[in-house]
Amino acid sequence: MTTYSSAILEGYRYLLTNHPNVFCIGQGLWSPWYVGETMTDLEKDFGTARIIDTPVSEQACTGIALGAALTGYRPVVTHPRMDFAILALDQIVNQAAKWSSMFGGQTKAPVTYRLIINRGGEQGAQHSQALHAWLAHVPGLRVVMPATPADARDLLIAAVMSDDPVAYIDDRWLYELDSELPAIRELDLSQLGPAILAEGSDITLVGAGYSAHLCVQTRELLAREGISCEVIDLRVLNPFEPSVIVESVQATGRLCVIDGGWRTCGVAGEVIAAVAEKVPPATWRMSPFRITLPDAPAPTSKALEDIYYPRADGIRDAVLVALEREVSR
Amino acid sequence: MTLWLGELANPLAFTGPVDADPLGAELSFKFLERMIVIRRVEETVAQMVASGEAKCPCHLAIGQEAIAVGVAAHLNPRDRVFGAHRSHSIFLALGGKPERLFGEILGKDSGSSRGMGGSMHLFEPSIGLLGTVPIVAATVPIAAGAALAAKMDGGSDIAATFFGDGATEEGVFHETLNVAAVKQLPLLFVCENNLFSSHLHISLRQPFDSVVRFAAANGMPGKLVDGNDVVTVWKTASELVARARNGGGPAMLEAVTYRWLGHVGHRDDIDVGVRRKDELGLWKKRDPIERLAHGIVESGMYTTADLEALDATVVVAVNTALDKARRADYPPTSLLFDAVYSRVADGRTD
């Protein structure tokens, strides 16, 4: 069995061993506590010239990675908390994401931004954010969120081997999740998209990253109530290809989207809209709905955190309420 | 530590002919030719803006020609050059073809960025120009990354980042100076200090008017020169480039100049520019082209008639280039989507 965090480490080891033009840059890469166990000893095994710990300069270091990507390398920039990547957004959104388009497709920017969602534990408003929806809004920037140990490893490899800038967003709440891993395959990121994580027939549950894991937990709870859930893991948020979800909803007629980001202009709303455009009204057995973070900054107090983050039992209850409403209608 | 530009900011000083002897006949003629190409191309673009033919924002470098020419002489196509919004001069100084620049400004498929970038987004890897962008200071860290890559490659290639005095007010500029120094990157910082950022004079933006002080603060050599003297720029850049190539780390060149036109477009901005009205006429007497031409004639290498003939040749070539660009096709509409994600097989496309 391999944990999600060990799987990330395996991904790095594979990349650094097999691709000499891969290097890692970011704050805390030589520290045991910044990025959990996901990069342990890489600087010892691959050298500090390839595992580069940096001054406290998010924007410069993110730009440096782009410059190296334009000249033959495949850097991975790590922002150990996604919140701090906001300081580097010019380099991600204005520069890397547009580099191919604004220069007529004559160049490429194979840079990976590893952005870690690191929330809970009373860390508060500036240490807990999940901003994947912002990034998924930007054409030219691929966005992936692994929900399983296999994807934690293989999407990292696919992101780094992609010729485009990629935001790879992992979640520390998944680090202990474990499973058997298949052999490593280098996947073509442009061919990947949402995938069915578990089959079912009554309702389609959709999530990305930790939210996909919540969908799996919810599926188990609802199975005890005699309800069969199909779980779809978004995996790739941008460019977004909804056909797998559309197909599932055409069979179930019901859709609930879970998201660890805020509600307004979020990923859950985008998924529902994209599916609603394709699934005819007569197919729907109930209105699609979403369960997201409330539109408030993350609290610190434990009592408030308990109501802030969606949990499987709450999602189960929401689905049951929606189904009851459908029956009584 | 140098804090003030002193006489370099006084337009009444440094107006005489430059000493062209160190260049020799061949190089001085080449430098003059490149500077005249820049001048005539920029004048042409100004007319295109005035007539409405050029719609994209065009930031012209008339008056600033010497800096790009003096620095570019030490760079080769393996080096990695990045610029900002006012980069036509860099493109042409590196040897970019006027036809490709005109094409880009007109949004044509024949342009250096296939018409997808316009004046502010130039890309010509065959001459080492890996990108220019208008987000102020944005290419400074990108150039540092290209320098890091050059260092990892283990050769003697370097990166050069051209920026204006306004860029030194951006945080990322200082972040990059620090990282470049601590990682000893082969990177040349070239500040074209034209005293203005958009409409605002540097005295209203910074406590001192020389930016080379930021080199000292980061423990790297910084040289302050007359940016309208191509020979001095060339000599000083030679030293700093050689140092970077030989593993000596980053350095900064601050070259003082003045733009004759406004921040953007064909007008001179006298109506909006602080201090411009009093100074512009004086600064035109520190014309980098006139000063080199005088120096060449004084040295006896060429006659005034030779140089007039050169100018006439350049004018014909520039007009021919514009004609070609005008006749070129627009990019296929499919490029709108085809270029969002990469379809390039290898890293650098040169």
Image (cartoon, coloured by chain):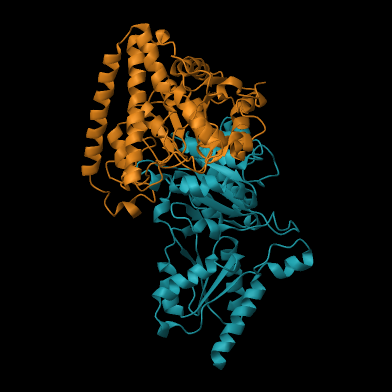
Nearer to me, A219 or B218? B218
Q: Is residue A191 visible?
A: yes
Nearer to me, A101 or A29? A101
In the rendered image of this protein, does residue A162 appear above or below residue A124?
Answer: above
Q: Is residue B144 visible?
A: no
**Outermost bottom residue:** A328
Nearer to me, B313 or B152? B313
x and y percentages locating residue B271 in the rendered image: 49, 43
- Residue drawn at (51%, 33%) of the image: B163
Chain A hue? cyan
x and y percentages locating residue B50 in the rendered image: 35, 44
Nearer to me, B332 or A23? B332
Using residue B140 as the reference point, say whether residue A79 is left or right of it.
right
Using residue A289 as the reference point, say whether residue B293 is left or right of it.
left
Q: Quadrant of residue A107?
A: top left
Q: Quadrant of residue A210?
A: bottom right
Q: Check the picture and name the quadrant holding the C terminus of chain B.
A: top left
Q: Check the picture and name the quadrant holding the N terminus of chain B.
A: top right
Q: How many marks?
A: 0
x and y percentages locating residue B22 in the rendered image: 42, 8
- Residue drawn at (33%, 40%) of the image: B47
In the rendered image of this protein, does residue A3 appear above or below residue B8?
Answer: below
- Residue drawn at (59%, 44%) of the image: A78
In the rendered image of this protein, does residue A239 appear above or below residue A162?
Answer: below
Using residue A140 as the reference point, say whether residue A222 is left or right of it.
right
x and y percentages locating residue B164 in the rendered image: 52, 33
Chain painted in orange in the figure: B
- Residue drawn at (41%, 73%) of the image: A247
